[in-house]
Image: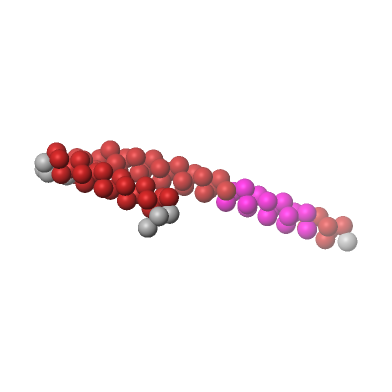
Amino acid sequence: MLDGIIDILTKIGDFFSSVVDFIVSIFTDLANFIKLLGQFVAKFPDWFSWLPVEILTLLVLFIGVVVLLRVLGRD
């Protein structure tokens, strides 16, 4: 009888531990995504440096608007 109660309490503790690990994982992945997105934006002009500055500026602006609208959920 006591073993069953201890087993249930252990499983409840494991559940809450899994939920906390899941939430921490989501925020860690979100932070990594934002870091990688910043690195992409910083390196993007280097990849297309052969374009004229005006076209490169418009291209970077266009990509930024598309990413912003996707993050906000607007298609």
Count the numbered circles shown: 0
Residue 56 in view of the camera? yes
Query: Which of 26/17 is in front?
Result: 26
Is any atom of residue 49 visible in this view? no
Question: Is 73 displayed left or right of 10 in the figure?
Answer: left
Instruction: Say which of 18 and 30 sits in front.
Output: 30
Q: Residue at x 65, y 49 (%)?
A: 17
User: In terms of image quadrants, where is residue 41?
Assistant: top left
> Which residue sits at x=34%, y=49%?
67
Query: Which residue appears at 17% of the width and 42% of the height?
Result: 56
Q: Residue at x 41, y 46 (%)?
A: 33
Magenta: main secondary structure equals: helix
Location of the N terminus by quadrant is bottom right
Furthest-right residue in view?
1
Q: Is residue 21 magenta?
A: yes
At which x and y percent is residue 47? 19, 44
Magenta extent: 8-22
Q: Quadrant of the C terminus?
A: bottom left
The reply, left or right, for residue 10 in relation to residue 42 is: right
